[in-house]
Image (cartoon, helix red, strand yellow):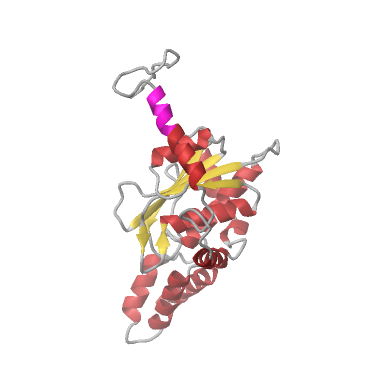
Amino acid sequence: MAAEDIESILFQHAKAWAKLDPNVATASHVENLISRAKQHDDSAASVEELRSYFPTNQEPPHPRIGFGTAGLRGRMQPGPVGMNDLVVIQTAQGLAQDILRHNTDGKPLKAVVAYDHRCHGTFDLSSKNFAIYTKLVFESVGITCTLLDGYVATPILAFAVTNINAEVGIMVTASHNPKQDDGYKVYWSDGCQIRSPIDERIASSIVEEGNLSPWNDYGEQLQELKTKANSNEELIGECYGLSNPAETEKIVKDYFQAIDMSGLVSGEVFEETSISPKIAY
């Protein structure tokens, strides 16, 4: 295939992505790169940057960030191989569809989401926004979603799954990865990270055609939430009224109480009913 044809595929792929992207900063950055790439004075550098965001095969499907037992993890940047708003929305939609598909008894479904402090100022990407988008996606299909208020540690999210009897929990963090990265860890109903074959099942659901395009204008929804929060001092919490500080405080309190009762603290057993833990290395 001629270099001109490969470049044309690259531009088409990037343009299609930007059209779906709800994030103004990342979408406009990609569109500007396409425009500059078509100008001879800046084409080489712009094409190279586009290729870093959109590794392009000659035919679809094009490469995208992998989903596995650790969920997602990658650099915060535009395009399908990075962590960004569109990738998170696609992932949340695929995850929500999988949960709905396997809810054979029709019971009410619950999820819980938490986030850390990671952010990318230039691209307006953050763990907080990824968590908010996840809640918006889940609740758009009837899955009640608890968004923990403020930054919490990953073990608290894992504990929260069983504490509130949720089907799934998502912790938006990249743990020890470099600051440019972010991640999307998925915990199943037992409070443990997903494992095979659940991860393969969810990965397949994410790339279904109906889950790759946003079901709603989530970017507009987020902007409306921010505008409302700025004009309404009565809204509580760190997430524009979507999170519940009181519920979060209760979960955190329950978490530390469970540790106290576990027998792990200072080797003491606080009550006769406490059970010595079984530990496997």
* 92 displayed left or right of 277: right
Residue at horizontal 49 percent and vertical 71 percent from the top: 18
- Which residue sits furthest front? 234
Decide whether residue 257 is among the magenta residues: yes
Percent coordinates x, y for residue 181 in the rendering: 34, 56
Residue range in magenta is 255-261
User: Within the image, what quadrant is residue 78 found in?
Assistant: bottom left
Q: Nearer the viewer, residue 257 or 193?
A: 257
Residue at horizontal 42 percent and vertical 17 percent from the top: 274
Split into 4 quadrants, where in the image is the C terminus?
A: top left
Percent coordinates x, y for residue 143 in the rendering: 62, 47
Prevailing SS of the magenta stretch: helix
Residue at horizontal 60 percent and vertical 58 percent from the top: 209
Residue at horizontal 52 percent and vertical 44 percent from the top: 112
Q: Tell me, yes or no, if residue 194 can be seen here.
A: no
Classify 154 as above or below 38: above
Total marks shown come to 0
Classify 188 as above or below 77: above
Split into 4 quadrants, where in the image is the N terminus?
A: bottom left
Percent coordinates x, y for residue 248 in the rendering: 48, 43
Q: Nearer the viewer, residue 271 or 113?
A: 271
Percent coordinates x, y for residue 205 in the rendering: 57, 49
Q: Nearer the viewer, residue 276 or 274?
A: 274
